[in-house]
Amino acid sequence: MTSRPVITDAQRRARLMRRAHLDASSRATDAVEAAATMVGLHATTPSTVHLAAWARVGPGFARESVDTALYDDRTLVKHLAMRRTLFVFPRDVLADSVGALGPRISASERTNMLRDLRRSPDFDDPEGWIETARQAVLAELASGESLTSTELRERLPALDGYISYGAGTSWAGRAPMGPRVLNMLDAEGAIVRGPNRLSWHLSRPAWTSMPLWLGEELPSISVHDGHCALIGRWLRTHGPGTETDLAWWLGSTKTAVRAALAQLETIQVDLEGGGVGHVLPDDLPDGTDDEPVEPQAVLLPELDPTTMGYKERGFYLGGHAPQVFDSAGNGGQTAWWDGRIVGGWYRRADSSIDIIPLEPLTRAARRALDARADELAAWLGDEPLKTGYAAPYARGL
């Protein structure tokens, strides 16, 4: 017999609705608060940032406010972080991420570049090429100028290297190494994606020095302290979670996760679906966050941080994984009812939003989801919306 507290799936869904700003009574004040609560908003697809904020911020949320936070106020910053994925972070979460994950991701980027450079006959000194390219970029951006990857390669011969791939195949070609150097520098916190040269739903970042863009140096945070900070933030919003959830979400190791959980003095709980979860010491299942939430309709974009927040997703995903997630593990656009994924959505050519049920829906659920779809269509207006990861359910639509 276990003496651990038990947290049911219904309690986990209620917590998620309230804490992730998905419940109408717990909306965020702005995109910065939403990003802080969620420990970052996914930004691989540019529109996801705006749509994830729309789902969590109260009425009157303006799409332009996200760009203001990103490029004018710079209270939100794009950064390559967990699982080598692009996120948008508030500054304090950015510092935690660079400390926790920067060394691991930047080292991985460098190792992968060395592997490919060594396979190419065009690079006599792969390590020297990387370091020369790295220093050239830092020197060029030291004045505070913002330049796209293409502009940097045009200015810096040291950065303009290519590798060949697929020799003798139908998919043979050449790939530039310059963007990979930029990703390595981004991961380590040296440079940052500054102004976007395209519209809100597209991406052509101009790179710039991170300290100059922010107007300050990021505080130095150790890998362990960064893990503790990120895991503490994650548990505050997503908890309970398992070691598997946390290691997957961070793109880190269970050793690092366990060390952070010990430092945080988390408490183990039994999960209804099986397994052992962790909660912060002051977050045992006896508060108002565990009380039922009135069923509500929620529409989330592809790669939303709630959809992608866990590895073990059964309590909100059920058996819909084959319809929602592609073979690489990317979650598509989702429709939620009563704290669960019950379908998806897509935008028609006439800009209306259609709900795609993945299970039978009650009349109340369908009416609420259709009404939320109309709200999203009105908010988008005639603005184009480019998606990057269509869910399996959307094939052929």
Image: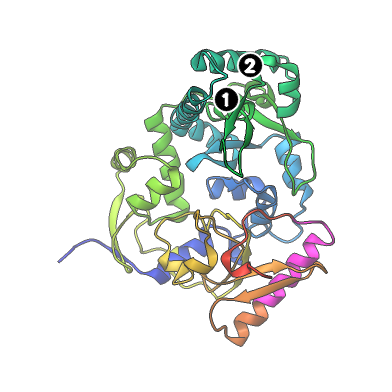
Residue drawn at point x = 57 percent, y = 85 percent? 362
**Relative to 149, does residue 382 appear above or below in the rendering?**
below
**x, y percent for residue 22:** 58, 63
Image check: 121 left or right of 268? right
Looking at numbered disc 2 in the image, what kind of residue is underneath it? Leu
**x, y percent for residue 391:** 59, 63
Q: Which mark is residue 185?
A: 1
Instruction: Tell which residue pokes out farthest to the right in this image.
Output: 382
Image quadrant containing the N terminus: bottom left
Image check: 150 left or right of 330? right
Mark 2 touching mark 1, by CB under 8 A? Answer: yes
Q: CA distance from mark 2 to mark 1?
A: 9 Å
Classify mark 2: helix, strand or loop: helix
Q: Which mark is residue 138?
A: 2
| Residue 165 seen in this snapshot | yes
Residue drawn at point x = 69 percent, y = 59 percent? 58
Q: Which residues are magenta?
A: 369-385
Which is nearer the eye, 19 or 282?
Answer: 19
